[in-house]
């Protein structure tokens, strides 16, 4: 080999017999195991209690390996082995299905396919005992995602969840806490300045009583703040150990790409998730643009409001599910500080942002169409043996591009009803999804490409 490197002829190197490491092949010990015929018979017929140990142990494939072969959306048992089945608390029977887990975006953070949104659970109208029971049941069922915001109940939601987590003493690695930054209980403290982001995360950590937040979510983009300042502030929080990841909520595809580009330019941590509104009447952004974001830059999708902020209700009035006006009014309760621009949405802006599904924003003709669609969906739900609420959540779960669907519950009964959507999703067949598409008739399509050359 040396002669070849020096320009000589290449030939195979011969073993150096003078080396102390050299062993004569004829004197080398035989390493194979020879079993006599009685030993082989005893090996095949013996049980583990016989005390006979095989001289060779076969490798055993780990469960993690099997999960990789089955894909990221594999079935995984809950925390208890065998999986815990909940009793008939809500007259719904037993929940025998298990929750699936998959990586959030292209990160290594594995999240359950259903997450608990704390907006409804920690509402001032819900007692602390009921909220604790809801969180406990959700955790026991396998949910490991708890979504919060600094504005929910003026910060009271984070205090309540932190107290519950401390009381239960669950392993910190067994659940993920997400909290949002931008809205604040005080209007003059909102925005995405570096000062506000860092102070908000520190305040959330104090209220939660945790050492770190799993995912800090930037709720809405701030047009008054440079994107470089936003991504650098998020990167600083991660570098300081205050958060593990960061993501966005209600950002457009253009804003997400701008943030990712700035992260790559300034060597900052990139976002891993976008929280997007997704339900039967709001589909465009989640189905058209977010899958492309995942394939190109690895940003996952977490859907919120699968029940359209509670407007899709299982309540029936003369055989017709209704958009309950009271449920929309609950949006303006003290549980969340809604900015003026969110409450008073102009009609044109509402159409642009996908709010046309709201009853209060549509005309009489549009309301009649929505009622007719809900009536047919209710009939389909009865055919499947479920409620309209369960059908709506199950329909969201059938979207393979979603990594997690956030559900809300003000009681254990509502939580168990939403969890039964896992069983409904397993019963949904392609013909059922086709029927839903026929009823809704709102499948989003990309706008036609406009060629500037053709216009010349």
Image: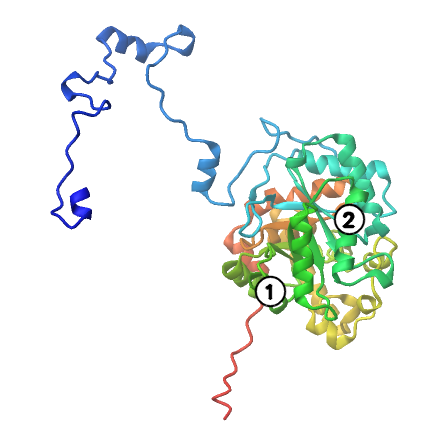
Task: Tell me where residue 104 appears, x and y as whole percent.
Answer: 58, 49
Closest to the observer, 122 or 417: 122
Quarter of the rendering occupied by the N terminus: top left
Task: Tell me where residue 216 appears, x and y as whole percent.
Answer: 69, 51
Closest to the observer, 240 or 231: 240
Residue 233 horizontal side relative to residue 62, left or right: right
Above or below, 2 against 310 in this view is above
- Identify the mark nearer the N-term, 2 or 1: 2
Q: Which mark is residue 262?
A: 1
| Residue at numbered disc 2 | 202
Identify the secondary structure beneath mark 1.
Answer: helix
Above or below, 67 against 240 in this view is above
Can residue 90 be seen at all in this image of the molecule?
A: no
Q: Do the numbered discs 2 and 1 sit on residues whose CB atoms are within 8 Å?
A: no
Real-space Cα separation, disc 2 to disc 1, in angstroms: 24 Å
Residue 410 horizontal side relative to residue 176, left or right: right
Closest to the observer, 178 or 448: 178
Direction bottom: furthest residue: 456
User: Toward which corner of the image does residue 281 lie, by quadrant?
Assistant: bottom right
Task: Tell me where residue 264 appears, x and y as whole percent.
Answer: 55, 61
Closest to the observer, 169 or 431: 169
User: Toward which corner of the image does residue 126 lie, by quadrant?
Assistant: top right
Q: Residue at x 75, y 49 (%)?
A: 148
CA neighbours of label 2 inside 10 A, class few (<14), some (14 to 19), many (20+) = some
Can residue 245 be seen at all in this image of the molecule?
A: yes
Q: Residue at x 75, y 66 (%)?
A: 358
Above or below, 46 against 274 in this view is above
| Total marks placed | 2
CA neighbours of label 1 inside 10 A, class few (<14), some (14 to 19), many (20+) = many
Identify the secondary structure beneath mark 2.
Answer: helix
């Amino acid at each position: 080999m040396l002669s070849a490197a020096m320009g000589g002829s290449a030939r195979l190197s011969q073993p150096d017999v003078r080396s102390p490491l050299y062993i004569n092949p004829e004197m080398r010990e035989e390493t194979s195991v020879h079993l006599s015929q009685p030993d082989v018979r005893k090996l095949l017929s013996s049980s583990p209690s016989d005390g006979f140990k095989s001289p060779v142990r076969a490798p055993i494939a780990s469960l993690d390996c099997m999960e990789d072969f089955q894909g990221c959306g594999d079935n995984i048992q809950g925390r208890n082995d065998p999986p815990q089945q909940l009793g008939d608390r809500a007259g719904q029977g037993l929940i025998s299905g298990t929750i699936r887990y998959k990586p959030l975006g292209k990160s290594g953070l594995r999240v359950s396919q259903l997450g608990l949104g704390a907006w409804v659970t920690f509402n001032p109208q819900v007692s602390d005992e009921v909220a604790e029971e809801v969180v406990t049941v959700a955790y026991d069922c396998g949910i490991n995602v708890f979504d919060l915001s600094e504005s929910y109940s003026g910060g009271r939601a984070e205090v309540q969840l932190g107290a519950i987590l401390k009381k239960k003493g669950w392993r910190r690695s067994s659940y993920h806490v997400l909290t949002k930054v931008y809205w604040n209980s005080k209007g003059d403290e909102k925005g995405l300045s570096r000062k506000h982001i860092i102070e908000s995360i520190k305040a959330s950590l104090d209220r939660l009583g945790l050492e770190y937040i799993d995912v800090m979510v930037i709720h809405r983009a701030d047009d008054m703040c440079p994107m470089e300042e936003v991504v650098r502030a998020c990167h600083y929080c991660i570098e300081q150990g205050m958060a593990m990841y960061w993501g966005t909520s209600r950002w457009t595809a253009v804003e997400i790409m701008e943030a990712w580009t700035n992260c790559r330019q300034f060597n900052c941590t990139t976002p891993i998730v976008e929280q997007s509104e997704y339900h039967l009447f709001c589909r465009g952004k989640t189905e058209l643009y977010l899958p492309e974001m995942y394939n190109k830059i690895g940003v996952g999708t977490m859907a919120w409001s699968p029940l359209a902020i509670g407007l899709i209700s299982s309540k029936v009035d003369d055989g017709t599910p209704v958009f309950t006006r009271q449920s929309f009014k609950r949006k303006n309760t003290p549980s969340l500080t809604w900015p003026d621009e969110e409450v008073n949405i102009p009609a044109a802006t509402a159409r642009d942002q996908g709010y046309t599904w709201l009853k209060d924003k549509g005309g009489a003709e549009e309301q009649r169409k929505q009622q007719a669609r809900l009536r047919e969906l209710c009939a389909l739900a009865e055919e499947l043996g479920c409620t309209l609420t369960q059908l709506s959540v199950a329909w969201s779960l059938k979207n393979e591009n979603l990594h997690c669907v956030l559900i809300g519950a003000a009681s254990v009964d509502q939580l168990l009803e939403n969890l039964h959507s896992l069983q409904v999703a397993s019963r949904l067949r392609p013909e059922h999804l086709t029927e839903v598409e026929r009823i809704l008739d709102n499948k989003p399509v990309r706008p036609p490409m406009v060629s500037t050359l053709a216009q010349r």
